[in-house]
Image (cartoon, grey):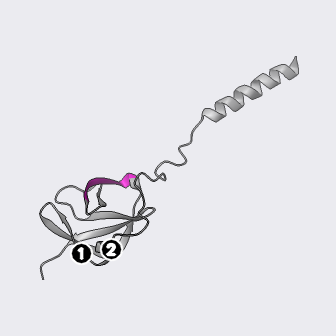
């Protein structure tokens, strides 16, 4: 009798702990695909034409989670993002560079 109760309690315990989720992977799953190779036009320094303005690639990347950006369009086969917290007029545009890495683009400042 004792063994049967112990077995039932252990099975219930294992079942309930299997249903528990600590959210351990939240924000780490990749939503947007990582390009195999960055587009040649970006590597050549060519701008993105977005909302009638030219945005130029910067020789740097930002470390962002996919959950921190939203897509706003596509340009020449490359998905374009902004940070979720940014509002128009946007400060930067981004393209996915690698896992949690986004190349950013800025408007040329007048000298």
Q: Is residue 57 above or below residue 92?
A: below
Label 1 to label 2, Cα distance in Å?
A: 9 Å
- Chief secondary structure of the magenta span? strand
Q: Is residue 71 magenta?
A: yes
Whether residue 13 is visible: yes
Q: Which residue extends farthest top?
A: 1
Q: Residue at x 48, y 51 (%)?
A: 29
* Residue 40 numbered mark, or none: 2
Packing grade of label 2 (10 A; few <14, some 14-19, many >=20) is: few
Q: Nearer the viewer, residue 88 or 47?
A: 47
Q: Residue at x 65, y 34 (%)?
A: 17
Q: Position of residue 68 (x, y in %)?
A: 36, 54
Quadrant of the frame with the C terminus: bottom left
Quadrant of the frame with the N terminus: top right
Image quadrant of residue 100?
A: bottom left
Q: Is residue 48 above or below residue 30?
A: below
Taking 63 as reference, is 5 left or right?
Answer: right
Image quadrant of residue 15?
A: top right
* Residue 46 numbered mark, or none: 1
Dot 1: element: loop
Packing grade of label 1 (10 A; few <14, some 14-19, many >=20) is: few
Q: How many marks?
A: 2
Segment tinted magenta in the rendering = 67-74
Image quadrant of residue 98?
A: bottom left
Q: Position of residue 26 (x, y in %)?
A: 49, 48
Q: Position of residue 49 (x, y in %)?
A: 18, 66
Taking 39 as reference, is 47 left or right?
Answer: left
Q: Is residue 51 magenta?
A: no
């Amino acid at each position: 009798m004792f063994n049967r109760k112990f077995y039932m309690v252990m099975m219930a315990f294992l079942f309930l702990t299997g249903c528990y989720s600590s959210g351990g992977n939240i924000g780490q799953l990749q939503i947007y695909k990582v390009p195999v190779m960055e587009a040649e036009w970006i590597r050549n320094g060519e701008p993105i034409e977005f909302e009638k303005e030219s945005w130029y690639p910067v020789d740097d990347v930002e470390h962002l989670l996919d959950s921190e950006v939203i897509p706003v369009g596509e340009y020449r086969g490359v998905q374009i993002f902004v940070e979720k917290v940014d509002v128009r007029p946007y400060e930067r545009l981004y393209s996915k560079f690698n896992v949690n890495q986004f190349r950013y683009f800025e408007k040329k400042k007048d000298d």
